Amino acid sequence: MKIATWNINGIKARLDTVQAWLKEAQPDLVAFQEIKSVDENFPRGVFEDLGYEVHTHGQKGFNGVALLSKVPLEDVQRGLPGDDADDHARFITALVAVDNIMVRVASLYLPNGNPVDTGKFPYKLAWMDRLQRWAESRLALEEDFILAGDYNVIAQPIDCHDPVVWEGDALFRPESRSAFFRLQNLGLTDAVRQTDRDQVFTFWDYQAGAWQKNNGIRIDHLMLSPGIADRLQECQIDKFVRAWEKPSDHVPVWITI
């Protein structure tokens, strides 16, 4: 099974690009982030015509996540537990059958956290604590899962073109990186790092010629529970999509299991 994650940076602006990539890559299941659309305005018919079942957790103008699958999904859940006051659309999960096991796949859009001297940074860290508690609860139930999405965390210096440039940014702050590794240290596997030890990126800003200079960062991750990590066959970053017309500033990352 081929499972992908992609922050598309707005479904309205990226509809043609997304369709082209889906037709070429043929993922069985894909997690989108930043759909920037309420549920009723998401163009689900376009993707249903391509053979996908569509589930969204949308929000007007920003945020928003989705799961598209050619394999039937069950028990779709929206929202990250732990804070009833949090109305940001950043988390959706569903169960999918992979061979003889059920796997819960999540599409997550972790808060950016900037500026760090505002309430946005504590919100980011609190959200990451909630994500860790969610993962702990799934592991306690012995439920296999894939946490796919835009984490807005540069985990290691190798994951950015110049660590000095990112010093003090919420994506690279020690608190953010520590929270990421606390999650990983539950026994999760970073699919990209498991298969590729080189410097690779998943995001290039639209500004200052970042794409042309390869001034990128790696912030899009697929974190796998132990049972899924044992089934990992391949992981790739479709960097070439960033060169397409009207691209997202992120590119797809996918695994086969």
Image: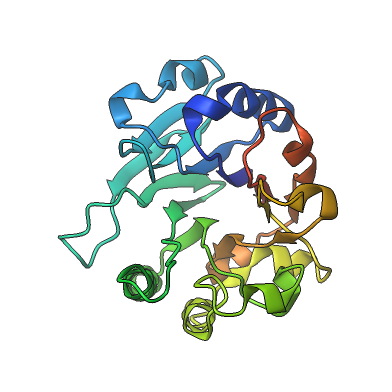
- Residue 240, given in percent of the width and then of the height, sits at 80, 40
Viewer-nearest residue: 30 or 74: 30
Q: In this rendering, would 243 be left or right of 96?
A: right
- Residue 140, given in percent of the width and then of the height, sits at 35, 75
Viewer-nearest residue: 167 or 72: 167
Which residue lies most toward the front here?
208
Q: In this rendering, would 213 be left or right of 173?
A: right
User: On screen, 86 above or below 136?
Assistant: above
User: On screen, 145 above or below 21?
Assistant: below
User: On screen, 93 above or below 118?
Assistant: above
Count the marks: how many? 0
Q: Quadrant of the N terminus?
A: top right
Quadrant housing residue 222: bottom right
Viewer-nearest residue: 126 or 183: 126
Viewer-nearest residue: 79 or 115: 115
Quadrant housing residue 252: top right
- Residue 232, given in percent of the width and then of the height, sits at 68, 59
The residue sitting at 52% across, 14% down in the picture is: 49
Q: In this rendering, would 111 be left or right of 246?
A: left
- Residue 142, given in percent of the width and then of the height, sits at 40, 69
